[in-house]
Image: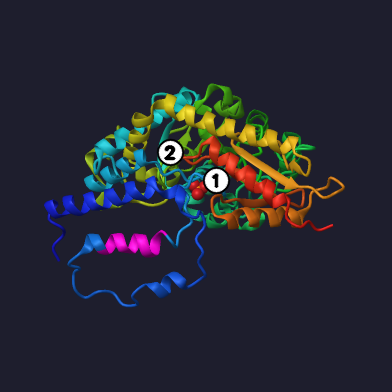
Amino acid sequence: MPDLEPEEFRRLGHQLIDWVAQHRGGVDSLPVQPGIVPGSVRAQLPQTLPEQPSRSLGDELVALLDDVVVPGSLQWQHPGFFGYFPANSSLLSLLGDIASGGVGAQGMLWSTSPAGTELEQTLLDGMAVALGLGARFTFAGGGGGSLQDSASSACLAALLAGLHRSHPGWRDSGVRGTETVYVTAETHSSVAKAVRVAGLGGQALRIVPFAPGTFAMSPAALADLLAEDVAAGKTPVMICPTVGTTGTGAVDPIREIATVAHAYGAWVHVDAAWAGVAALCPEFRYLLDGVQLVDSFCTDAHKWLYTAFDCSFLWVADAKALPAALSITPEYLRNAATDSGEVVDYRDWQVSLGRRMRALKIWSVVNGAGLEGLRETIRGHVGMADSLARRIVDEPGFALAVPPSLSLVCLHLLDSHGRPDDDATKAAMQAVNAEGHSFLTHTTVNGHYAIRVAIGTPATQPVHIDRLWAALLRAYQLPRRS
Ligand SMILES: *Cc1c(COP(=O)(O)O)cnc(C)c1O
């Protein structure tokens, strides 16, 4: 079966780029949430695959996008998208994405894509400096960074490095069953998943209490739990503080946690999937205070740093740690560059063997926006969150569920006694979502239903916050339960 001729690709490619430009230009006029029931997309699709090549591939693709994909998708790039965390897919990053597929290199080894490997190394060194992580996380400093598919994979890789450090025999004999991993009740579920995937079993996950009155890990409680566990014959392998938890944006104190962890030799992995990129702005760097003391640090480019999924930064302080845990070299992958020990083979930094040139996405974003452009965007989002939070504080009947964290605002509607009103809060969220111009999701805070407003798509402007706030005020006027 012949591929497209390059000239034919040029024609179809232009048609597709035109479609993307048109779609993005008009995304604000679409409902954010699709009005779709399960199975309705499948029902629109042919149930058998074509035997013959299409004679009008471009038109058919555009029709599929217009008729099926767009109406059947949540519009994550809509300026009124405030759900979950953002999944920025900037047009800038799409340039790098296309370039990556266009070159089509598979960068499992340095020798299979020297440019991809060294571009990635260079960009990650630069980003480590830009985030203020310190020279320790650069290749020159003995550490280094890699681009993973997701924060979930990064956490699994870090856990495997931690397991290896605690028990190098792990590679042959497997886990011992005494390993423990420390998180809080706010920690992302991907850590619990990594613990299970690594074969530690869910019981290995230890939930450290919060510091009083916060949703942040208590270093004192961590110290107590570690002492208790070690006395009971457990082996602490990883401690995972979060900077910016998914529910409420809580920030675990890295410095104190790392200091406690060091006495036990446990690997400290910082999960800053959403919030970490804010450290590009010096005024938010305090959130990472103590990061110089940890073993690994992860933040997603694909949440709040303009980069189309998937693209997650993972830095380690010891460049040998991940290869020590993960490297396996069958004969067919042997090569002189690897044997020389002078190159990074990124397959040794991740679970899967193959990998794309994600660095091209980061290159287009960083060069297209400049660090100053990225900082401006982050500051803009944080400023919009502050303005929304002020309105909530000033409006009787509304309250912040927790203090705003960067660009994340969590709120309740209140009952006539000034207590969180779960039913009214939920009804307000549903009413706003039903209006179609904004999209909100929820969490629970102290057992109460709370609306999360996560601000962060590239297109979101103050006018979209005004529109959301007006809808929340309208929703407040809905018939209230007494
Ligand atoms: C979103 C999120 C994750 C998971 O991110 P992926 O890159 O989708 O795997 C992990 N931790 C936190 C704190 C998150 O917000």
- The way the protein has been coloured in the rendering is rainbow
- At 53% across and 30% down in the image, what residue appears? 380
Determine the CA span between mark 1 and mark 2: 13 Å
Q: Residues within 10 Å of mark 2 (few under 14, many from 20)?
A: many
Q: Residue at x 15, y 58 (%)?
A: 4
Residue 383 point in image, percent of width and height:
58, 30
Residue at the image position 27 percent from the left and 52 percent from the top: 16
Q: Which residue is mark 2?
A: 306
Where residue 369 sits: x, y (%)?
A: 38, 30
- State which quarter of the image contains the N terminus: bottom left
Q: Is residue 278 left or right of residue 442?
A: left
Which range is magenta? Answer: 60-70
Q: Is residue 323 visible?
A: no
- Beta carbon at label 1 within 8 Å of ligand 1: yes
Would residue 375 be found to the left or right of residue 182 on screen?
left
Asked whether the viewer can see residue 369, the reply is: yes
Q: Nearer the viewer, residue 126 or 391?
A: 391
- Give, as a three-letter code, the residue at label 1: Phe
Q: Position of residue 424 (x, y in %)?
A: 75, 55
Around disc 1, counting alpha carbons within 10 Å, would you say few (fewer than 14), some (14 to 19), or many (20 or more)? many
Disc 2 element: loop
Q: Which mark is residue 65?
A: none
Residue 71 belongs to the span the image colors magenta: no
Give the farthest residue toward the right: 417
Determine which residue is flagged by label 1. Answer: 85
Q: Amino acid at mark 2?
A: Tyr
* Disc on the earlier residue, 1 or 2: 1
- Is 69 magenta? The answer is yes
Quarter holding the C terminus?
A: bottom right
The answer to whether residue 192 is above or below residue 278 is: below
Among the 4 quarters of the image, the one containing residue 434: bottom right
Secondary element type, mark 1? loop
